[in-house]
Image: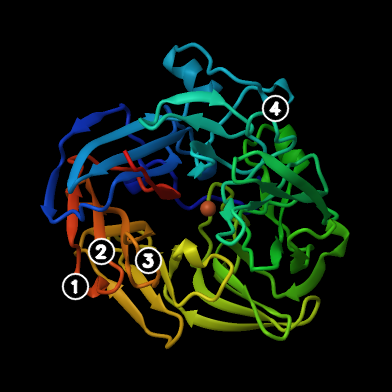
Amino acid sequence: MTDGATPTRDYVSGALAPVTDEATVADLEVTGTLPPELNGRYVRNGPNPIDPDPATQHWFTGAGMLHGLRLRDGRAEWYRNRWVRTDEVTAALGEPATPGTRRDDAPTAAVNTNVVQLGGRTWAVVEAGQWPVRVSDELDTEAIDPFDGTLRGSFSAHPHTDPRTGLTHAVAYHWTETCVRHVVLGPDARVVREEPVEVGGSLMVHDTAITETRILVFDLPVTFRLDEAVAGSVFPYAWDPDRPARVGVLGLDAPGTEVQWSDLDPCYVFHPANAHDTPGGGVVVDVCRWERVFDRDRLGPNEGTPRLERWTIDAPGGRVRTEVLDERPQEFPRVDERRTGTATRWATTAGLASAGAAHAPLYHHDLRDGSTTVVDFGPTSAAQEFVVVPRDGSTAEEDAWLLGFVTDRAEATTDLVVLAADAPADGPVARVHLGRRVPDGFHGNWMPTTD
Ligand SMILES: [Fe+2]
C-alpha cells in the first residue's frame, strides 16, 4: 500500500459480514404468488471469507459462497448456501481437496464472483487466474474444471452468451501477461478461441460487452503492482494515474491485432449493461462508470459512486461521446439476455446505499424514453442484483420476471423477490422468505430446468 492508501471502511462487517454456516432450508414461506412457470434455480455467488482480518481483507478475495433457491410449481422447495470448495476452503474446513487439475499446480483461491450455466452444467467463476469450479444442481462442489481441460489461460467472472450463435464470449487477464485474451466457448462449454489482444501492460479487466459483430475491451487505469504482490498483497491492483483510459473494439472472430482503440477520460467500469452496433458502423454501450477506484482504498471500490452512462463510439478508433443517463449511485446492471448485443429498451440496476445507510432501491430504466421506475423495498431494505427471467413463450422484454435478493438490514433477513418486468412499480408479486441473511455479494443467474 502506498502513502495515502488508507481504507476508510472494512469489507467484512454489516451487510458484508460473512455467515459462518451452511444451511439447507426446505419449503420456504412465500408471501404473494410465486409464478408456477418459474421452474429452476436462482443461484448467486459472493465473497464469504472464513475468519477474515477486517484490516486487510480485500472485498474481492473472500472465499466464494453460493446461495441458491429451487423453485417449482409455485413453491420454494429449498434454500441452500455452500462454500465453493477451493483449496483454501477445504483446508479451513478440514476436508479433502476438491478433484481436478490446478492452474500451474498452484493451490486454488477464491472463486467468488459469478455462477453460470453453460452447456447444461454449472460453474462458479472469477477473474484473474483461478480456474472455474463445477458445482452440482444442489450447489455442492464437484471439481476444479477448466471447461473439460480446454481452457489454457485464465477466465472471467463475466461470460456473455450471444443468443444468435450460442457462443459465449469473455475477456480474461492474468498478471503475468501484457495482453488480455478474448475467450470464446462453444455451446458445449468447451473453449474454441483464446485470442490475445496486446495492451502493453498488466490490467484488471472485470467485464466486457458484445454486439452482433464486435467485442469491447475496457483498457482502464487499474494495473498490477508487482512490488505489492511481492510484499504479500492478495489483490495487488491499483489506480494508475499514468495510464490513459481507452476502449477497444474487436471483431468477434478477428485477430487481436485488429483491435481499434478510442480514448476515454480516466474512469473505471466494472459492468456494462449491454452494447449494440449502430447503422453507421459505430458502437453504443451503457455502463456504470466510476470516476476512480483502488487509489486511496485498495480493499474495495470506495472512492466516489458509479453512475449510469451511455457511451457512443461513432466509429471504431474514433471519439467517444458520453451521455449521463442517471446520476444516482448504482451498479450491477442487467438486461434481458435474449437481447445481448442488440439495442435493449430496459436495464435494471441496484442502487448503492450511501455510507452507513441501510436503504437502497432498485432502478428499472427505460432507455428509450429516459425514465426510471424506482422500486423501494422499505426504509431499512436494500436491493441486490436483479436478473431478468423471460416468461414462458414470451418474446418481448417486458414479458418477464425480475428476480433478486432484498435484505432488510434492521431484521438481518433476506427475501428472494419477484417483480413483474412490465409493472415493477406495483411491487413484489412474491417474496420468498429465507429466514436468514444473505451477505451482499456479486452476481447470480436464473437456471431453468424442465424436470
Ligand atoms: Fe462483476
Looking at the image, do the residues carrying marks 3 and 2 touch, with CB atoms under 8 Å apart?
no
Q: Seen in the image, is 169 located left or right of residue 379?
A: right
Q: Amino acid at mark 2?
A: Leu
Residues at marks 1 and 3, CA–CA distance in whole angstroms: 18 Å
| Quadrant position of the C terminus in the picture | top left
What residue is disc 3 on?
Answer: 351
What residue is disc 2 on?
Answer: 419
What residue is disc 1 on?
Answer: 426
Q: Position of residue 335 (x, y in %)?
A: 45, 66
Q: Residues within 10 Å of mark 1 (few under 14, many from 20)?
A: few
Q: Position of residue 218 (x, y in %)?
A: 69, 62
Closest to the camera, between mark 4 and mark 3, is 4
Q: Earlier in the sequence, mark 1 or mark 2?
A: 2
Looking at the image, do the residues carrying marks 1 and 3 touch, with CB atoms under 8 Å apart?
no
Q: Earlier in the sequence, mark 2 or mark 4?
A: 4
Q: Quadrant of residue 147?
A: top right
Numbered mark located on residue 103 in the image: 4
Q: Residue at x 31, y 69 (%)?
A: 421
* Front residue of 267 and 148: 148
Residues at marks 4 and 1, CA–CA distance in whole angstroms: 48 Å
Looking at the image, do the residues carrying marks 4 and 3 touch, with CB atoms under 8 Å apart?
no
Residue 408, visible in the rendered structure: no
